[in-house]
Image: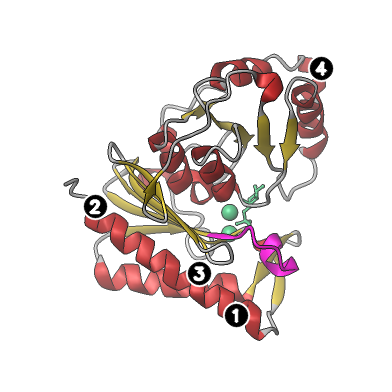
Amino acid sequence: MSPCQPILVFAADLACRAGALIAAERERGGLTLSYKEGVELLTSADLKSDELIRSELTAAFPSHRILSEESSPAMPQEERNQGPLWIVDPIDGTVNFAYGFASVAISIAYAEDGVVQAGAVHSPFLQETYCGLKGGGATLNGVPLRTGDCTQLERALIGTGFPYERQDRPRLVRRLNHVLMHCRDFRRIGSAALDLCWVAAGRLDGFYETLKPWDFAAACLIAREAGALTGHLGKVPEHIPPDLCGEDVVAAGPGIYHELVALLRAVPPEEVQV
Ligand code: IPD
Ligand code: CA
Ligand code: CA
């Protein structure tokens, strides 16, 4: 048994408990809404979920660091890279959550020296729990996962997302336009963690987006363990471990991964300038 198996069980259970909390908060009504830096939606449930996850992790693993979107997003890179680190998104898909959509997840990953060892993604409204263990496979509600077997980009269903800051959107729309001309269609799910888990489950054939570590750390491992290829469009800076680098993340089934990466890299330079 992998030494991280008990860690994964702990993470999955905690993600489920946080999921029950946010589902109850939405059901109860009266969510408080605010905006981070004037644009990024934050609900009272994001903060309650963060508080629950953080206090349980601190009680169980007092010496471990926690990189959480809501309570420690500015942790210096050197601290992220060393020793045991938990990477937490207390609600991935906050906009979906606030609008009553079901595609919402809690994401908890565990890394050692910058390498993700275990990841749990739980979707309370879909009652789905995705788990991945480095070298140990991936599961959905305990059933082993396998990515799709699509081999032609023109038959591929691709997911992506857009940042809250608007200045980069024109460039991303031009990139999307380029890819859209070569694939079956796009889906914009609104939770990057679920996008990647859905690549793992074969519900999407590929996915790309620029993300933060808490969006993808757990789900990228799950996708990889389900047989997907994952990587980056550009060169990963030397001081950032690839598992923690969110710039232009790509994941896809092995039958289309290289074609998708080549297509994304081939967007004419004038089309990616703002
Ligand atoms: C967001 C979601 C969304 C993605 C954004 C993320 P949040 O996370 O994953 O799908 O497109 O880039 O920021 O803010 O809901 O935790
Ligand atoms: Ca997120
Ligand atoms: Ca979030």
Please tell me whether mark 4 sits on a helix, a strand or a loop: helix
Chain-order first, disc 4 or disc 1: 1
Disc 4 versus disc 1: nearer the observer: 1
Binning the other alpha carbons within 10 Å of mark 4 as few (below 14), some (14 to 19) or many (20 upward) gives few
Amino acid type, residue under disc 2 in the picture: Gln
Q: Which residue is mark 2?
A: 5
Binning the other alpha carbons within 10 Å of mark 1 as few (below 14), some (14 to 19) or many (20 upward) gives some
Which of the image's four quarters has the C terminus?
top right
Residue for point 54% across, 64% down: 70
Chain-order first, disc 1 or disc 2: 2
Percent x, y for residue 61? 25, 65
Q: Which residue is mark 1?
A: 25
- Counting labels gives 4
Whether residue 65 is in magenta: the answer is no
Q: CA distance from mark 3 to mark 2?
A: 21 Å
Disc 4 versus disc 3: nearer the observer: 3
Please tell me whether mark 2 sits on a helix, a strand or a loop: helix
Span colored in magenta = 95-105
Image quadrant where residue 53 sits: bottom left
Image quadrant where residue 167 sits: top right
Amino acid type, residue under disc 4 in the picture: Glu
Q: CA distance from mark 1 to mark 3?
A: 10 Å
Binning the other alpha carbons within 10 Å of mark 2 as few (below 14), some (14 to 19) or many (20 upward) gives some
Amino acid type, residue under disc 1 in the picture: Glu
Whether residue 100 is in magenta: the answer is yes
Q: Which residue is mark 4?
A: 270
The answer to whether one can see residue 50 in this image is: no
Q: Is residue 56 left or right of residue 101?
A: left
Please tell me whether mark 1 sits on a helix, a strand or a loop: helix
Q: Which mark is residue 146?
A: none
Q: Which mark is residue 19?
A: 3
Q: Is mark 1 within 8 Å of ligand 3?
A: no
